[in-house]
Amino acid sequence: MARTFFVGGNWKCNGTSDDVKKIVGVLNGAEVPPEDVVEVVVSPPYVFLPLVKSLLRSDFGVAAQNCWVRKGGAFTGEISVEMLVNLNIPWVILGHSERRLLLNESNEFVGDKVAYALSQGLKVIACVGETLEQRESGSTMAVVAAQTKAIAERVLNWDNIVLAYEPVWAIGTGKVATPAQAQEVHTELRKWLHENTGPEVAASVRIIYGGSVNGKNCKELAAQPDVDGFLVGGASLKPEFIDITRDRISSLFSLTI
Ligand SMILES: O=C(CO)COP(=O)(O)O
């Protein structure tokens, strides 16, 4: 089964309601490939989710950037999976390196969140990735395998998971992984999935790349056979995000000639 290309926009902790309205206006007016060719999902900060949900075109999905690990209750400051379901938010980003590193989210905690979110019907963009130190010490694959294993141990069905490989050294640095570097880790991740979750999961799970993706570098990355899309940070706040969704078409074209 072909893997539908996936382009996510992670707005992180940015913007005002006026900015959000402007970005949504640009997205709503854009000509993009049809949903079965490119799936587009944007992830605004929590407080803007209802606004985005109400204004955004219906062929674009919406994701929260985090959620609580269990059923809601006395957890001050947290947002529960049940609340996201109640607002009809279909997606959640979990395990982003900014949360793993700045908020000390462990592999196990992220795995628990992924399992709980899926159990309540959410779809998950699960992020993995190594730091520069880990890459330089040759432990990239061990790190991303351990992060993926903590999810695989808690989840049987991968239908609603998109795996995002986001090397920490490439996030917000302008230092994008080369297409070969991205392809290498994506291939290894797919091999890991094959060995640990089976051939069907390995063949069908979308593995997307994140880290300084922009309108210029996306085409070459998208042409890699195991790069099934992107999780875009900074550039998702700009009109350039539309070019990134469109470049799938040109990379497909360039592959066929
Ligand atoms: O963290 C990212 C997406 O989740 C990537 O961020 P940048 O595209 O700003 O490097």
Image (spheres, rainbow, N blue to C red):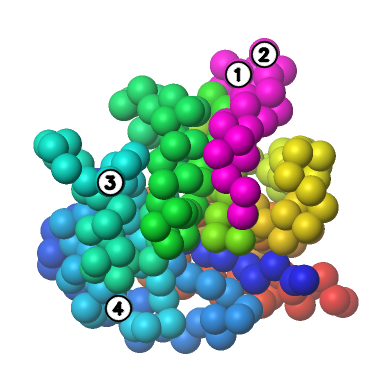
Q: How many marks?
A: 4
Left or right of 49, for residue 175: right
- Sequence order check, earlier mark of 4 and 1: 4
Task: Please state which amino acid type lies under the numbered disc 2.
Answer: Ser
Tag 1: Cα neighbours inside 10 Å, few (<14), some, or many (≥20)?
Answer: some
Element type where label 2 sits in the image: loop
Q: Magenta part of the protein: which range? A: 132-157
Tell me which residue sits at (31%, 26%) in the image: 103
Viewer-nearest of labels 3 and 2? Answer: 3
Which residue corresponds to mark 1?
134
Tell me which residue sits at (79%, 48%) in the image: 198
Which residue corresponds to mark 3?
71
Q: For the residues marked 3 and 2, what is the alpha-carbon distance in whole angstroms?
A: 39 Å
Task: Please state which amino acid type lies under the numbered disc 4.
Answer: Leu
Left or right of 64, for residue 131: right
Which residue corresponds to mark 2?
137
| Residue 133 visible somewhere in the drawing | yes
Quarter occupied by residue 185: top right
- Sequence order check, earlier mark of 3 and 1: 3
Classify the position of the C terminus by image quarter. bottom right
